[in-house]
Amino acid sequence: MKKLHVSWEQYHRLIEQLALQVHQSGWTFDALVCLARGGMRVGDVLSRIYDRPLGVLFTSSYRESAGTRQSRLLIAEHLSSASPLPGSRWLLVDDLVDSGATLIEGMPEILRRYPQVKELRSGVLWRKGCSAAVPDYYCQYLPDNPWIVQPFEIYDQMGPEDLAPRLQVH
């Protein structure tokens, strides 16, 4: 399988590109919802740039084969935020759309659970060619569906005992 390795600098630039793309569209939103775990960093940065409240909805589909094989989508029962998210226009963000199942199942679920939301749009950094969903906003289209190696994935194979040698702490 082809892999796309992404540095922290590239990753953050993509988040900034997504923020700019939403801004240039002229669409405004009242709150952000990020899909955890992949969308947490994206949501955090956009929440800061736009000065909008952020909610976190935990989803999980890559649980098998050390997180490399997709299975049935699980959606948390509750959205987590410090206070109820305001307004009727929300932006849902994630890192990528792969199969598209998270957007296809997640967006209607959010609208069902939060009837005050009248408009829900989606934004991601990467849209893979195999996705059945097309987000409203995305930075890169990847027609050949590479596995994206994101900069934080180094921690997937690391334990706390690995930190001292890495940081050269004695």
Image (spheres, rainbow, N blue to C red):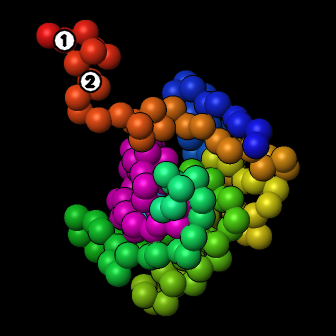
Asked if residue 55 lies in the magenta stretch, the reply is yes
Q: Residue at x 57, y 26 (%)?
A: 7
Indicate which disc residue 163 carries.
2
Q: Quadrant of the N terminus?
A: top right
State which tag comes first along the sequence, 1 or 2: 2
For image coordinates 48% across by 38% down, the residue present is 153
Image coordinates for residue 158, horizontal then vertical, percent: 35, 34
> For mark 1, what is the residue?
169
Q: Residue 148 lies in magenta, yes or no?
A: no
Horizontal side of residue 150 vs 26, given as left or right? left
Quick one: quadrant of the C terminus? Answer: top left
Disc 1 residue type (three-letter): Val
Q: Is residue 139 left or right of residue 122?
A: right
Residue plotted at (49% across, 90% down): 112
The reply to whether dot 1 and dot 2 touch (C-beta < 8 Å) is: yes
**Residue 141 visible somewhere in the drawing:** no
Q: Is residue 158 above or below residue 139?
A: above
Kind of element beneath mark 1: loop
* In the image, farthest residue toward the front: 65
Q: Position of residue 106 (x, y in %)?
A: 54, 76
Inter-mark Cα distance, 1 to 2: 8 Å
For the residue pair 15 and 36, the one nearer the viewer reads as: 36
Please state the extent of the stretch shown in magenta in the rendering.
Answer: 35-62
Amino acid type assigned to the residue bearing label 2 in the image? Leu
* Image quadrant assignment for residue 55: bottom left
Figure check: 122 above or below 6: below
Which element type, helix, strand or loop, lies under badge 2?
helix
Crowdedness near tag 2: few (<14), some (14–19) or many (≥20) residues, C-alpha within 10 Å: few
